Each structure stands twice: as C-alpha cells, then as structure tokens.
Image (cartoon, rainbow, N blue to C red):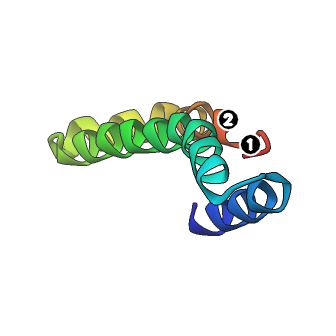
Amino acid sequence: MAIEDAIVLAELLRAADTILDAIARFQARRQPRAHYVQQQSTLAARAWAAPAAVRDTALRQRGDQILRERYRPLIAVP
C-alpha cells in the first residue's frame, strides 16, 4: 500500500492548489481502502488463531475462494 499511497499522493499534489488541499483529498481517497485492508488483516489473524484442524479444513475446502473474495475489492485502481 505504501507504493499506492505514493502514487496517489503525487497525483493529488500535482493537481492541487495547495498542499493542505492535496492532503485532505488524499485522506478522503485512501482512508476507505486502508480501513478495508485493516479489517481483512484482522479477520485473517483471527482465522490463523483458530484451532489448526478447523483452520486447515477451511483452507482446504475454500482457501482459494476466500482469498479471491478477500482481495477482489483491492483490484480496482487505488
């Protein structure tokens, strides 16, 4: 996400009238994505903390699907 942040910030700084305006737009644009990633990280950590037998069974049965569903929203342009 750091590289995404750098690209978005550079784009917004280039187009903004003031640095404060660029920062405000940056926060508004990036906060939802950062929040989503934080939520998904928390969910993933909880899954890894599940008993090994439960976690491993879930991953064998739906691991690929879970991964695709979790990261699908991040495919869009930041």
**Amino acid residing under circle 2:** Arg
Residue drawn at the location 51% of the way across and 31% of the way down: 62
Q: Element at badge 2?
A: helix
Identify residue for label 2: 72
What mark, if any, has residue 18 been given in the picture?
Answer: none
Q: Element at badge 1?
A: loop
Q: CA distance from mark 1 to mark 2?
A: 6 Å
Q: Position of residue 60 (x, y in %)?
A: 45, 40
Residue drawn at the location 59% of the way across and 53% of the way down: 20
Residue 62 lies left or right of residue 39; in this view the side is right
Comparing 39 with 68, the one in front is 39
Q: Are marks 1 and 2 in contact (CB under 8 Å)?
A: yes
Q: Position of residue 67 (x, y in %)?
A: 56, 41
Q: Residue furthest front?
A: 17
Q: In the figure, residue 59 lies in which quadrant?
A: top left
Residue drawn at the location 28% of the way across and 40% of the way down: 47
Q: In the figure, residue 11 lies in which quadrant?
A: bottom right
Residue drawn at the location 54% of the way across and 44% of the way down: 27
Q: Residue furthest right?
A: 15
Q: Position of residue 76 (x, y in %)?
A: 77, 39
Comparing 29 with 22, the one in front is 22
Residue 70 lies left or right of residue 75; in this view the side is left
Q: Position of residue 35 (x, y in %)?
A: 44, 38
Identify residue for label 1: 75
**Amino acid residing under circle 1:** Ile
